[in-house]
């Protein structure tokens, strides 16, 4: 066991403190590490991996490197939770795997898996990863060992970017025009683009913490994210679906591949489906049943997911398919085989979400607050013994808070919490009440030596927010967060803690991956695009402004923009709200979209005869001047 290093002012990572090392050692005694079933399942069907596992982008830089996780083959160090180390070792396995006859997966080449189902002539691709670069390498690996089959269909199981972003690595617009269908659950496009645009910059910044993309990979750094290792950083795109799945039981046959769909909206994603392959006795569970407890409210931020609905759809999946399925697989992790094991896996996953839902409601109806429920709830022993229920990605702690939020919102009912000071002002007052920063840090160092890292992180945060230039406070806070990361079973908690420590020591890392790619922006409807523009209006700067701009498009109703009271409203066609425009701009819809996205200059379009302006052109310029840009590197662990 490591000796206590204490907290020093170094900007480098530290060893594990004795209490963390002891806690990690206790994990080994608590859980059945001798159970090797998951390793057998993960390795079964292995065909081969790529010769060069560094996936590079157009600029030659690496966007994915699975061999960077080779250190996981070593024994778990004191600086990592052994349960998370085990999960990461499984998730880091990479290559082409046979799931069952005619069904293959490429795993370990992105956060998610790509599944390939062989048809009469070609291959159906299910969930083409995040980046075009990783998807292209995955498809090439498949073809190298199974033949140069054309992609005859693409299926998106749900609306998260790791399940569609790499589509241009497997098909093109020309393929779709030539008859290759792109299948997705209804309302997929709406949710896919809105999540990555409206709150996209904030989500992307927090995702930098969640997936730890800026952390060094290694024993004291990023070891995985539970659901997969991390996110690739290549080119994300989107080709809109051409075939919507609108009901459970809908059956489609493409290239001889028969698919029966099970719609599961509001589970892991707002638009999601499972797909049964009856001729293969196989069931794809998308991301509704994976080898971990999933998120009810992801740490990067999203809409709260409803575990009651989630559990209901898992019960429905069992009723529909369990007696005809020999293998169940998902878009993350590894398959489960055998009907008895499939039934146990699906019902235990169902019980996991149902228990969290029902027990949280029971306790909130007894008056417990989110923090109290998170500290009180205990999982049933049978579920805790099953490795696939562990909180590697979601956690019991933050999931029960999500259930509370779903039903009762952010307020816990205590009026003292109704109008609290914001973080910086509260921090200054806390530190003053506690006797000043020197006194707080002296007491916090004692707490650090005693192994109470949760308290150190909580109390020293006040000193950092009261005085972000206090180097001693920043280093002590970093040391405390680091120790919490070392002890965490949850991969995303570890990444949050360690990224926070990194930024406190060395400054902001920014946002390694961006979700608002040109392809995603191009997929926005005009309404969505104008809504996204309204989000960027600096309201206080234009409280007194009142301006109206009309866009006239050939063959379509005009679009009126009205900025008043700091609110940008758009209407189409004649409405009681439409005002006489200060300026009317005539141009094609494609040019309008380019102007609104900043990809084209209106004056240039006018000069080239592609746009005309009647009225005061300066009013549109004034409107653009009220727009702000999101900050992809905003402060997280400092004010």
Image: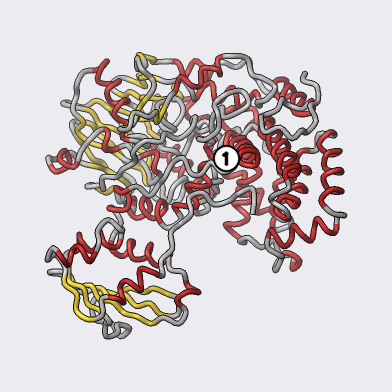
Q: Position of residue 63 (x, y in %)?
A: 39, 31
- For label 1, the crowd category at 10 Å Cα-Cα, with few meaning under 14, some 14 to 19 and many 20 or more, is many
> 504 or 267, which is in the foreground?
504
Q: Is residue 238 left or right of residue 147?
A: right
Q: Is residue 524 left or right of residue 225?
A: left
Q: Residue 331 placed where, x, y %?
A: 41, 33
* Left or right side of 369 for 604: left
Identified at 23% across, 65% down, the residue is 602
User: Which x, y percent locates residue 454?
Assistant: 75, 41
Q: Nearer the viewer, residue 485 or 412?
A: 485
Query: What residue is drawn where x is 35% and y is 41%?
Result: 157
The residue lying toward the viewer, choosing from 473 and 351, is 473
Q: Quadrant of residue 220?
A: top right
Q: 65 and 469: which one is in front?
A: 469
Residue, disc 1: 394
Where on the picture, by quarter, is residue 77?
Answer: top right
């Amino acid at each position: 066991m490591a000796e206590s290093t204490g907290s020093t002012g170094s900007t480098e990572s530290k060893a594990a403190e004795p209490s963390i090392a002891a806690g990690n050692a206790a994990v080994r005694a608590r859980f059945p590490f001798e159970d090797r079933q998951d390793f057998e399942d993960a390795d079964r069907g292995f065909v081969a991996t790529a010769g060069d596992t560094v996936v590079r982008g157009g600029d030659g830089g690496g966007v994915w490197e699975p061999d960077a996780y080779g250190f996981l083959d070593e024994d778990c160090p004191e600086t990592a939770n052994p349960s998370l180390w085990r999960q990461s070792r499984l998730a880091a396995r990479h290559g082409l795997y046979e799931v069952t006859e005619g069904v293959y997966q490429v795993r370990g080449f992105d956060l998610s898996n790509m599944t390939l189902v062989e048809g009469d002539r070609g291959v159906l691709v299910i969930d083409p990863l995040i980046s075009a670069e990783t998807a292209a390498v995955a498809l090439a690996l498949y073809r190298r060992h199974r033949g140069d089959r054309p992609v005859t269909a693409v299926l998106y199981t749900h609306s998260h970017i790791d399940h569609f972003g790499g589509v241009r690595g497997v098909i093109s617009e020309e393929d779709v025009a030539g008859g290759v269908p792109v299948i997705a659950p209804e309302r997929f496009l709406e949710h896919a683009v809105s999540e990555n645009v409206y709150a996209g910059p904030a989500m992307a910044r927090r995702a930098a913490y969640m997936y730890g993309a800026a952390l060094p990979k290694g024993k004291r750094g990023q070891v995985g994210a539970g659901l997969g290792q991390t996110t690739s950083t290549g080119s994300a795109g989107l080709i809109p679906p051409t075939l919507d799945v609108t009901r459970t039981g809908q059956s489609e046959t493409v290239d001889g591949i028969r698919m029966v769909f099970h719609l599961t909206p509001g589970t892991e994603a707002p638009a999601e489906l499972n797909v049964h392959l009856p001729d293969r006795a196989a069931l794809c569970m998308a991301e509704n049943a994976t080898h971990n407890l999933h998120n009810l409210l992801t740490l990067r931020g999203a809409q709260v997911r409803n575990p009651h609905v989630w559990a209901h759809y898992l019960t429905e999946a069992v009723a529909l398919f369990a007696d005809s399925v020999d293998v169940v697989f998902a878009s993350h992790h590894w398959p489960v085989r055998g009907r008895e094991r499939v039934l146990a896996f699906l019902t235990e996953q169902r019980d996991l979400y149902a228990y969290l839902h029902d027990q949280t409601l029971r306790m909130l109806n007894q008056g417990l607050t989110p923090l109290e429920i998170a500290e009180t709830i205990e999982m049933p022993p049978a579920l805790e013994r099953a490795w696939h229920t562990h909180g590697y990605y979601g956690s019991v702690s933050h999931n029960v808070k999500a259930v509370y939020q779903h039903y009762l919102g952010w307020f816990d009912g205590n009026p003292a919490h109704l109008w609290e000071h914001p973080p910086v002002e509260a921090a200054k007052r806390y530190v003053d009440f506690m006797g000043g920063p020197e006194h707080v840090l002296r007491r916090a160092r004692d707490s650090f030596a005693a192994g109470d890292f949760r308290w150190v992180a909580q109390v020293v945060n006040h000193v950092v927010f009261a005085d972000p230039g206090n180097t001693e406070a920043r280093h002590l806070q970093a040391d405390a967060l680091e120790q919490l990361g070392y002890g965490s079973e949850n991969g995303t908690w570890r990444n949050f803690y360690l990224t926070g420590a990194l930024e406190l020591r060395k400054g902001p890392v920014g946002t390694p991956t961006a979700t608002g790619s040109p392809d995603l922006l191009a997929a926005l409807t005009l309404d969505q695009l104008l809504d996204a523009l309204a989000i960027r209006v600096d309201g206080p700067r234009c409280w007194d402004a009142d301006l109206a701009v009309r866009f006239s498009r050939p063959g379509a109703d005009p679009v009126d923009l009205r900025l008043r009271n700091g609110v940008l409203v758009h209407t189409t066609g004649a409405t009681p709200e439409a005002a006489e425009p200060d300026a009317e701009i005539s141009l094609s819809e494609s040019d309008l979209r380019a102007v609104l996205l900043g990809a084209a200059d209106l004056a240039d379009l006018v000069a080239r005869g592609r746009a005309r302006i009647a009225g005061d052109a300066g009013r549109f310029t004034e409107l653009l001047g009220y727009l702000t840009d999101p900050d992809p590197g905003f402060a997280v662990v400092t004010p």
